[in-house]
Image: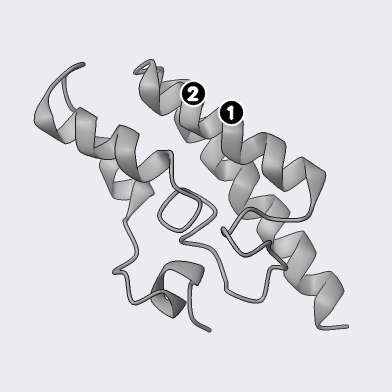
Amino acid sequence: MKTYSETWGKKPFDWNKFLQNPPEKGSEEHKLAIYLAGNWVTCAFGVQCSLIPRNPEGMPYDNISKMLGEKFNLKIRGCFWPEAKDVLGKIEKRSAEIIKGLTK
């Protein structure tokens, strides 16, 4: 399955790898992560399966997914790395639930 990022011709960002060794606040790497997390195509939901229904900007229609994506963005902005890891896990779990529901 393709990620949503790939359907837009973008290489999926590895958020799990990024969060294993997060950068210093305000560094160039942190600024890049803020940019990526703030865009639905490249955020934590952007690297999930393209089957997840989304609006034309890439925001999931599912309200729980939308809330988790916005929360993830805030955690990345604020350098709340452990919390970002937790939200990323919830995003992955929610994505799996949506895909399971779509493929029944």
The residue carrying mark 2 is 74
Residue 22, image x and y in percent? 24, 30
The residue carrying mark 1 is 71
- The way the protein has been coloured in the rendering is one colour
Residue 55, image x and y in percent? 68, 61
Pointer 1: residues within 10 angstroms few (<14), some, or many (20+)?
some
Q: Residue at x 53, y 41 (%)?
A: 88
Q: Residue at x 45, y 79 (%)?
A: 7
Answer above or below: position of 52 versus 75.
below
* Residue situated in front as seen by the camera: 4 or 103: 4
How far apart are the alpha carbons under marks 1 and 2? 5 Å
Q: Is residue 80 visible?
A: yes
Q: Is residue 22 visible?
A: no
Answer above or below: position of 103 versus 83.
below
Q: Residue at x 38, y 22 (%)?
A: 77
Amino acid at circle 2: Leu
Residue 25, image x and y in percent? 21, 16
Residue lying farthest to the left in this orientation: 28
